[in-house]
Image (spheres, helix red, strand yellow):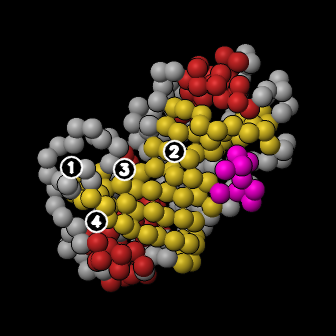
Amino acid sequence: MPRYALKVEYDGGPFSGWQRQVDLPTVQGAIEAALARLEPRDHTIAAAGRTDAGVHAFGQVAHADMEKDWDPFRLSEALNFHLKPAPVAIIACAKVADDWHARFTAIERRYLFRLVARRAPLTFEKGQVWQVGHPLDLAAMREGAAHLVGRHDFTTFRSSICQADSPVKTLDRFEIEEITRPDGFPEYRFRLRARSFLHNQVRSFVGTLERVGAGAWAPDRVAEALAAKDRAACGPVCPPHGLYLAGVTYPHDPFGQ
């Protein structure tokens, strides 16, 4: 059965996360239903990461096994036709080796979190960014984030229901930039790179650093929270709708980009 890699973009707002669930709308369920329109049978796809309810992606990667030898472009076009009107799009498709796996072949995941500081309600991007009503100190947030880079026990910053075997992970990069939006207000973009992440790790980081930026936490308190290895030491966990799975890296890019 030919195997295909799919690069997937989606708005997570209408979905109960990536993973298929009985009687709930999910991204995996939407794509598998579209595949069944092309080859009528049960389909099971695997993804590089299982995003939570409300989390978005413009660089999720999944793989699907087909019976027919599809031209990748025609397969992506057919899937996009059958995915309508769900806010899911296959933005690239490539044939891969039978042993290639969207999750296990991956060597890095990249996440983006968007935070806007503005008191007035958002009209165009509601549900796409996290909005706070006060200014934030970029330098302080960067100082706090620096404590998180490297190999650590991230027990403080993972969900109590996280199923990972170990809380020890290596965070390769954590960058925060401030841009001025067209409306004149600041947007803070948190960019993180690692081989893998714990459940709610990014949202725990950003929620904690927002407290640093707001002046409620000193930057060094992030290091203290990390060292505590205690979930109770974490700052607030921010909402999911500012989070995006931005990309997945493989030893060889299946999409040739």
Give amino acid for label 2: Phe
Q: Is residue 194 left or right of residue 157?
A: right
Which residue is labeled 3 in the image? Answer: 242
Which residue is labeled 2 in the image? Answer: 58
Mark closest to the chain's N terminus, 2 or 3: 2
Q: Position of residue 241 (x, y in %)?
A: 36, 46
Give amino acid for label 3: Gly
Mark closest to the chain's N terminus, 1 or 4: 1
Quadrant containing the N terminus in the rendered view: top right
Give amino acid for label 1: Asp
- SS for callout 3: helix
Q: Position of residue 247 (x, y in %)?
A: 57, 53
Q: Is residue 123 left or right of residue 109?
A: left
Q: Is residue 193 magenta?
A: no
Q: Is residue 157 above or below residue 219?
A: above
Give amino acid for label 4: Glu
Q: Residue at x 54, y 78 (%)?
A: 150
